[in-house]
């Protein structure tokens, strides 16, 4: 009796086993291609009848949009009519945009907001596109005081800075690699990032750049440290991991001729310089970067150019450099004042057409791009000035 | 887990009760088995996130076992034993909108990945099968039932490469992942794997000689290979297929 019950149970388990296995094997096939869930404007093009009269440079008519950007600004000549323009978009696959790509809008009253919806309908991003008639500013001195900073609005994890534009509004010309640090150190608090505000700087707030350990991810990737940096330009998070030297895009269009570069700093090198593999380099003291580079932002073929981590001091397009050659360690606020050394004449026409760019670069470890430096090296800067001349 | 323990206990009691039965002991058949195993893990369903397999390498693995069969009546028998199995797998697949999380210590990076994912696993398992056997003849037998497995060693690692991650959500920052170490997203989930596995076990024996025979065995885990609180990759289940020879000892 017991035996036949056991047999029944066994018979049942055999059948159940075979049936389940069959079911598993038959469902193990590929489903249909999933809908895309991305909702990006990847590229914006602005077609106008007379581009030479409308834009400063022919390449200004098209902008590639970073995945982290939702504010897109076209700086155009001051006299042009922006009341009837029709930007065209390249969207991420399957996404749709409202108002439509190519529809005509009035940009004279401020930005036009476009909403991009993913193919699967689940995700949306809002983009603010501005076309701003831009007067060529003739300024004697540009001031960078680092008073305007906030937590990155999207992540709330790290600080970003705004510069004060000549018309008094806030710009986004300063960038840092803080977004890249977040990839390796997701647990870091805003104050633990390489670039942080310094509440008590030389005059009001300053900025503090610190060489930081990149933790277990950094070690795994042989990218053991992140130098604190700050520069005029943009940071391309997309290639921060795969091609970090090109993630720092140094320079913004600049319409004045810089003569000298001044400011205040403190620099305290960290205790031990380490090499690429994390081994201590005995006897070596870390060094910082404080320099400004003025360069032509188009190559001989008319292609737009920015300088990167691997050519910011070596490109053929460099016109002038102002470099604090030795950033002497000091815990006291110390002034620097370096002249731009010109390698060629400045073309006034090109200058007026935004054909030159300026990069200011600060880094707490000069060899940080090669992941060499001392963890804890600390460079603070404040009250940075660019003194310019404008030839008549 | 409580359920698994109950099943094991029940099985042990059944075996113990039967082994006490003298006549039963006389009819017990014992064999030694050596097999070539293709083992690894497969997703519970090949979701539409997985767009294709670039390469699959099951690895060269083997299993050794001592198994016993207890004939009951009407061609039916009870089958159990102890197996030691090595399983490994190296699979490279193309994915789209694949939920991924890379964890190192306290740090993690997660999001939606589009690109390629390489996964390597190796597992060493001691397995206890509990099966019903139907004997069509002295030569040919079919088995089915459950197995319990205990991993003595476990590794699960790999990398996401040649693609991009949207950090956090599909509208998060887009981060390219390259091909080389350091440029790609490496992961290592050894410590997130369960020690215990259980599932379905089916097999067939062909006794072509008084002592010698051949067998085929397929086990499919009903438990995932990862602990229940682990969500970095989709549920994967252990699956082993074995072909081998058996030698009748008793």
Image (cartoon, rainbow, N blue to C red):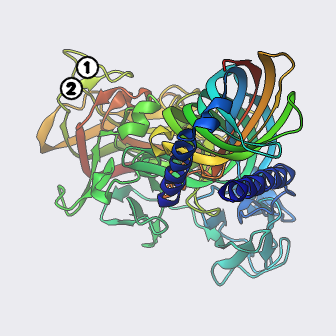
Q: Nearer the viewer, residue A387 or B219?
A: B219
Whether callout 1 and callout 2 share a subunit is answered: yes
Residue A156: give x, y in percent of width and height: 41, 66
Residue A391: give x, y in percent of width and height: 49, 48
Horizontal side, residue B212 vs residue B173: left or right? right
In the displayed structure, B66 sits above or below A237; it is: above
Residue A245 visible to an observer of this rendering: no
Q: Tell me whether circle 1 and circle 2 mark residues in contact (CB < 8 Å).
A: yes
Residue B76: give x, y in percent of width and height: 78, 44
**Mark 1, secondary structure of its residue:** loop
Q: Residue furthest left?
A: A332
Q: Nearer the viewer, residue B223 or B59?
A: B223
Instruction: Give the quadrant of residue B211.
Output: top right
Q: Residue at x 84, y 16 (%)?
A: B209
Instruction: Give the quadrant of residue B72.
Output: top right
Q: Which residue is mark 1?
A: A280
Horizontal side, residue A284 vs residue B98: left or right? left
Q: Residue at x 80, y 20 (%)?
A: B213
Q: Residue at x 33, y 47 (%)?
A: A194
Residue A212 visible to an observer of this rendering: yes
**Subunit of mark 2?**
A
How many C-alpha atoms fall within 10 Å of the one at disc 1: few (<14), some, or many (≥20)? some
How many C-alpha atoms fall within 10 Å of the one at disc 2: few (<14), some, or many (≥20)? some
**Subunit of mark 1?**
A
Q: Residue at x 30, y 65 (%)?
A: A147
Residue B227: give x, y in percent of width and height: 50, 52
In the displayed structure, A127 sits above or below B72; it is: below
Ranked by sequence position, the earlier of labels 1 and 2 is: 2
In the displayed structure, A174 sits above or below B225; it is: below
Q: Real-space Cα distance between discs 1 and 2? A: 6 Å
Disc assigned to residue A272: 2
Q: Nearer the viewer, residue B89 or A352?
A: B89
């Amino acid at each position: 009796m017991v035996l036949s019950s056991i047999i029944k149970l066994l018979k049942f388990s055999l059948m159940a086993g075979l049936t389940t296995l069959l079911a598993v094997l038959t469902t193990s096939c590929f489903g249909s291609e999933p809908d895309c869930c991305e909702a990006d404007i990847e590229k914006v093009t602005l077609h106008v009848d007379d581009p030479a009269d409308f834009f400063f440079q022919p390449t200004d008519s098209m902008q590639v949009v970073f995945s982290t950007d939702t504010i897109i600004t076209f700086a155009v000549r001051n006299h042009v009519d922006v009341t009837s323009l029709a930007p065209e978009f390249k969207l991420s696959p399957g996404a749709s945009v409202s108002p439509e790509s190519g529809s005509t809008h009035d940009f004279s009253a401020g930005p036009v907001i476009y909403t991009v919806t993913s193919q699967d309908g689940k995700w949306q991003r809002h983009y603010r596109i501005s076309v701003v008639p831009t007067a060529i500013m003739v300024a004697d001195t540009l001031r960078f005081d680092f008073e305007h900073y906030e937590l990155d609005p999207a992540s709330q994890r790290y600080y970003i800075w705004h510069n004060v534009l000549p018309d008094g509004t806030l710009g986004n010309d300063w960038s840092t690699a803080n977004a890249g640090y977040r990839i390796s150190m997701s647990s870091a608090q805003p104050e633990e990032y390489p670039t942080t505000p310094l509440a008590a700087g030389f005059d009001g707030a300053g900025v503090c750049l610190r060489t930081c350990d990149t933790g277990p991810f950094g070690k795994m990737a042989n990218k053991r440290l992140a130098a604190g940096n700050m520069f005029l330009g943009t940071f391309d998070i997309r290639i921060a991991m795969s091609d970090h030297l090109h993630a720092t895009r140094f320079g913004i269009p600049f319409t004045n001729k810089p003569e000298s570069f001044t400011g205040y700093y403190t620099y305290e090198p960290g205790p031990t310089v380490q090499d690429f593999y994390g081994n201590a380099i005995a006897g070596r003291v870390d060094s910082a970067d404080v320099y400004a580079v003025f360069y032509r932002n188009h190559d001989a073929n008319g292609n737009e150019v920015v300088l990167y981590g691997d050519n910011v001091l070596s490109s053929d397009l460099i016109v002038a450099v102002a470099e604090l050659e030795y950033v002497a360690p000091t815990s006291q606020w110390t002034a620097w004042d370096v002249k731009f050394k010109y390698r060629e004449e400045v073309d006034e026409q090109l200058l007026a057409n935004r054909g030159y760019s300026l990069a200011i670069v600060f880094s707490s470890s000069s060899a940080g791009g090669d992941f060499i430096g001392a963890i804890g090296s600390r460079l603070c800067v404040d009250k940075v000035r660019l003194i310019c001349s404008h030839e008549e | 887990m409580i359920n698994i323990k109950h099943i094991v206990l029940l099985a042990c009691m059944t075996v113990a009760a039967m082994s006490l039965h003298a006549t039963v002991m006389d009819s017990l058949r014992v064999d030694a088995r050596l097999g070539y195993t293709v083992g690894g893990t497969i997703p519970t369903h090949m979701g539409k996130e997985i767009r294709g397999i670039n390469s699959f390498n099951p690895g060269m693995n083997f299993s050794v076992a001592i198994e016993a069969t207890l004939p009951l009546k009407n061609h039916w028998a009870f089958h159990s034993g102890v197996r030691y199995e090595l399983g490994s797998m190296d699979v490279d697949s193309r994915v789209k909108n694949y939920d991924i999380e890379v964890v190192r210590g306290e740090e993690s990076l997660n999001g939606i990945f589009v690109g390629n994912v390489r996964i390597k696993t190796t597992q060493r398992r001691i397995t206890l099968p509990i099966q019903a056997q139907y004997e069509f003849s002295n030569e040919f037998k079919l088995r089915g039932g459950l197995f319990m497995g205990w991993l003595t060693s476990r590794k699960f690692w790999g990398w996401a490469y040649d693609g991009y991650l949207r950090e956090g959500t599909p509208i998060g920052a887009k981060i390219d992942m390259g091909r080389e170490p350091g440029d790609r997203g490496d992961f290592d989930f050894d410590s997130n794997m369960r020690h215990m596995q259980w599932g379905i076990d089916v097999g067939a024996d062909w006794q072509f000689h008084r002592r010698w025979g051949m067998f085929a065995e397929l086990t499919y885990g009903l438990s995932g290979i990862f602990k229940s609180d682990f969500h970095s990759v989709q549920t994967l289940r252990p699956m082993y297929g074995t072909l081998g020879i058996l030698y009748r000892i008793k």
